[in-house]
Image (tube, rainbow, N blue to C red):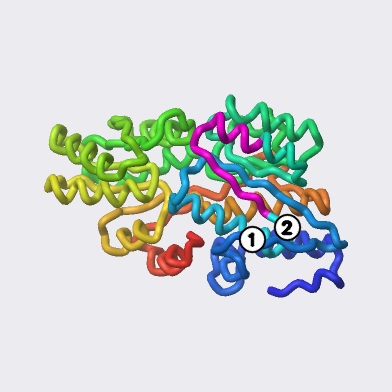
Amino acid sequence: MKIDRSRRSLRVLAVVAVASAALAACSSSGGAANQPGANAPAAGGTAPGGKQYTIAMVTHSPSGDTFWDKVQAGANAAATQTGVTLKYSNDPDSNKQATLVQNAIDSKVDGIATTLANPEAVGPVLKQAADAGIPTVAFNAGIDDYQKYGAKMYFGSDEDVAGQAVGTRISGAGGGGKALCVIQAQGVISLETRCAGVKKTYPNVENIQVNGTDLPSVQQTIGAKLQQDPSISWVVTLGADYAIVAGQAIAETNSTAKVATFDLSKDAAQAIKDGKIVFAVDQQPYLQGFMAVQMLYLNITNGNDLGGGKPVLTGPSYVDSTNIDKILEYANNNTR
């Protein structure tokens, strides 16, 4: 969709922009996924009225992570559509992430989008931005805390609800036995919440902590656990990359356990297609990045907000054998 911004009012822009975001989640031929810059750093540009806006996005992600690549792709697409300059930065160390938010404040950006994986570390700095009059939104992590730190909106999944849905689905899939919930990073509230949610609807759950930065180690740890405890019938991973190595551990140990995972990647989508992963719970990271930037822009330029004070949920969305043929194309495009 091409918008002649010189002829349309900001009110029309708001309607079109929100519609574009919805299309980004369900279409490969008309949404943000095909806009220039969807998979490359945003170059910035001049917004309507000649004003140049800069939005900072600060995440707790490690570099080179397939999940966060999609978040950044969505943010880039929204920046390109709106003509803003996007400054993306990240650090898995919560104290360093807080410093990055402070840097954004000091550089006088027009808006800040950030994750709150560790609200106590990052939240107070985000509150400083809000108190200074800089519009802020939270996404991906911090659904229970964003409002207390002044964020205007939240885009992400309710991890407790998603976890309960996983427990219900694996219970209905049969097999009984124990579910092993694999936590790849310590101190990340959303990961703990996922496993706790699974346990609410599938009580026989054991959590296992792994070093998510070392995939061979993750595979070895899961494999050792499978050999030690043959009652494990499900391995639930909290990230797509870990689902792949869980499948490899199952094959090497001749276990009969099945794999379910949170989040999606190109490889995980193919594994669902091949029957190696039963299903994935997708929180749609591309959409999170897109909406965080898009709605900050609309809030800055037109006073818009979404959610009515409540979180805007991007998940859980389920990917399994019933819809993988459609979703696989989008996963290969780095938009699902």
Total marks in image: 2
Q: What's the distance in space between the residues labelled 2 and 1, CA to CA? A: 8 Å
Residue 112: where, in percent of width, then height? 69, 43
Residue 213 figure quarter? top left
Kindly tell me whether residue 140 is visible in this rendering: no
Q: Which mark is residue 126?
A: none
Indicate the secondary structure of the residue bearing disc 2: loop
Amino acid carrying mark 1 in the image: Ala
The first of marks 2 and 1 along the sequence is 1
Residue 311 falls left or right of residue 16? left
Q: Residue at x 72, y 49 (%)?
A: 296
Q: Residue at x 31, y 64 (%)?
A: 273
Nearer-the-camera pick, 336 or 74: 74
Looking at the image, do the residues carrying marks 2 and 1 touch, with CB atoms under 8 Å apart?
Answer: yes
Please tell me whether residue 119 belongs to the stretch shown in magenta: no
Q: Amino acid at mark 2?
A: Val
Quadrant (top left/top right/bottom left/bottom right) for the N terminus: bottom right
**Residue 42 image label:** 1
Task: Using the rendered view, name the quadrant where residue 90 is placed.
Answer: top right
Q: Residue at x 73, y 30 (%)?
A: 128
Residue 320 at x, y percent in the picture? 36, 58
| Apparent side of residue 138 relative to residue 282 in the rendered image (left or right) | right
Q: Which mark is residue 84?
A: 2
Residue 121 seen from this side: yes
Residue 145 on image: x %, y %: 61, 30
Q: Which residues are magenta?
A: 86-101
